[in-house]
């Protein structure tokens, strides 16, 4: 993403917030895995959206005054020894080049500077990004600062910028769509590679290795989230990450995967028979799901309610499955459809958006139809990425083989 993209995102954020207030945002800190080993650092996604900076320990302070905004980015100071071990730290000139933030200082000045700003009398509120998922999560830097504000500067209002940031992230800009299209092409290659390699006897970890190898040819980013690849009965675990099972002749392969490009994630699911030929029962269910998906892409448009995406998927797929003789009562559909299927994608795979009531142009969300028929041993989902346009929608992942014919034709190019 460009400097102008990050600058624009911050300008639009500041425009939404009250004058005479401060904004303090954190890139995050590295988390310990075990012993002296740490998880690879993963920057806060909203911080990345607003600045483009990916390193840990960075803090953005914005002073929103009556007439303008002054921004300062606080950086870790140069440290020859530390940088020999863990790589180069962000340089002041990079801050301007990547994010468009003109001012930078070293982090050891942050506490003194914040103290002065808090006591200056120029600001009545401090905006922070509160994005805790569960109440028992350890305090992130934003929560620690909020506690300090309550204790030491009780005259300042603590405000949340979270929903304002989410509102911006809800509508994707053209450059974001372009990045997602690149990620979709990579995802297609990864899934098609698995289709080509597929054969009875193959282990789930071997499918995953094919996926990882394909993505690895495009760059170091790989999967946007842990790949779900399963076979046969393991398809009845929705979030399955063991990769230990084996595909037996007649089994379906389920995968729920997505590459990432320039910070943007895709989320695509395809199901196929490991032997390359749909059985009659697999075909029967697949046609229902496929027709439901096509129906959704024909009907989603601005003005439609977001909740109706899930609702319509369920209703339409029920009708198809009823016509096919798979289910006969509406009350029974829950036996086969275990989850909803419309979540936004973007900087996060379940994107941190201000979940909209009404669908609008620029939104990108998954249309995910999963059917799990335990009696028949058939479970899979068909998940695509839907970009809402001015008068309808487009399927960003339609290049990944979707119909029975496309999948069987692709699998005839089998490598074995
Ligand atoms: Mn998915």
Image (tube, grey):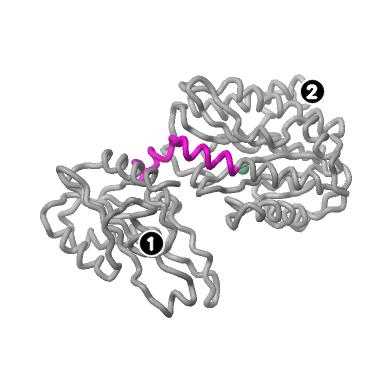
In the rendering, which numbered label is found on residue 415?
none
Q: Position of residue 259 (x, y in %)?
A: 61, 48
Q: Earlier in the sequence, mark 1 or mark 2?
A: 1
Give the distance between the C-alpha atoms of the residues marked 1 and 2, in whole angstroms: 52 Å
Residue 142 visible to an observer of this rendering: yes
Q: Position of residue 62 (x, y in %)?
A: 25, 52
In what quadrant does ligand 1 lie? top right
The answer to the question of whether label 1 and label 2 lie on touching residues, with beta carbons closer than 8 A, is: no
Q: Position of residue 103 (x, y in %)?
A: 26, 58
- Using the image, determine if residue 224 lies above or below residue 85: above
- Using the image, determine if residue 286 lies above or below residue 43: above
Q: Residue at 78% across / 22% down in the picture?
A: 324
Name the side, left or right, on which 35 lies relative to 415: left
Q: Which residue is mark 2?
A: 325
Q: Position of residue 190 (x, y in %)?
A: 70, 47
Whether label 1 lies within 8 Å of ligand 1 gets the answer no
Closer-to-camera residue (47/272): 47
Closer-to-camera residue (365/307): 365
Residue range highlighted in magenta: 162-183
- Residue lying furthest bottom in this view? 81
In the rendering, which numbered label is found on residue 139?
1
Is label 2 in a helix, a strand or a loop?
Answer: loop
How many numbered markers are drawn?
A: 2
């Amino acid at each position: 993403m460009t400097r102008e993209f990050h600058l624009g995102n911050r300008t639009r954020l500041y425009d939404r917030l009250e004058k005479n207030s401060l904004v303090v945002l954190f890139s995050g800190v590295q988390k310990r895995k075990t012993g002296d080993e740490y998880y690879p650092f993963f920057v806060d996604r909203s911080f990345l959206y607003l600045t483009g900076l990916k390193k840990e320990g960075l803090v953005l302070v914005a002073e929103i005054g009556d007439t303008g905004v002054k921004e300062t980015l606080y950086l870790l100071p140069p440290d020859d020894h530390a940088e020999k071990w863990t790589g180069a730290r962000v340089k002041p000139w990079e801050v301007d080049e990547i994010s468009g933030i003109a001012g930078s200082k070293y982090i050891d000045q942050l506490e003194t500077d914040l103290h002065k700003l808090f006591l200056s009398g120029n600001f009545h509120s401090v905006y922070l990004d509160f994005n805790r998922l569960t109440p028992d999560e350890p305090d992130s830097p934003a929560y620690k600062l909020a506690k300090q504000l309550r204790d030491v500067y009780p005259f300042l209002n603590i405000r949340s910028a979270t929903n304002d940031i989410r509102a911006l992230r809800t509508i994707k800009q053209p450059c974001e769509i372009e990045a997602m299209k690149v990620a979709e092409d990579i995802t297609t290659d990864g899934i098609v590679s698995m289709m080509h390699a597929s054969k009875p006897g193959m282990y789930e970890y071997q499918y995953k290795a094919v996926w990882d190898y394909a993505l690895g040819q495009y760059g170091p980013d790989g999967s946007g989230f842990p790949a779900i690849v399963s076979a046969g009965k393991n398809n009845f675990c929705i979030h399955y990450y063991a990769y230990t099972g084996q595909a037996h002749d007649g089994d379906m392969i389920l995968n729920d995967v997505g590459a990432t490009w320039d910070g943007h994630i895709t989320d695509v699911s395809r199901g196929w028979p490991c032997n390359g030929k749909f059985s009659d029962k697999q075909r029967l269910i697949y046609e229902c799901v496929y027709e439901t998906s096509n129906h959704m892409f024909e009907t989603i448009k601005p003005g439609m309610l977001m909740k109706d995406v899930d609702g319509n998927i369920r209703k339409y797929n029920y009708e198809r499955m009823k016509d096919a003789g798979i289910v006969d009562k509406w009350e029974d559909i829950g036996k086969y459809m275990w989850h909803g299927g419309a979540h936004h994608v973007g900087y996060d795979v379940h994107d941190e958006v201000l979940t909209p009531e009404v669908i609008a142009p620029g939104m990108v969300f998954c249309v995910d139809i999963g059917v799990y028929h335990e009696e028949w041993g058939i479970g899979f989902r068909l998940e695509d990425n839907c970009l809402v346009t001015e008068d309808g929608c487009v399927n960003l992942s339609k290049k990944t083989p979707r119909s029975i014919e496309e999948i069987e034709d692709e699998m005839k190019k089998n490598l074995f």
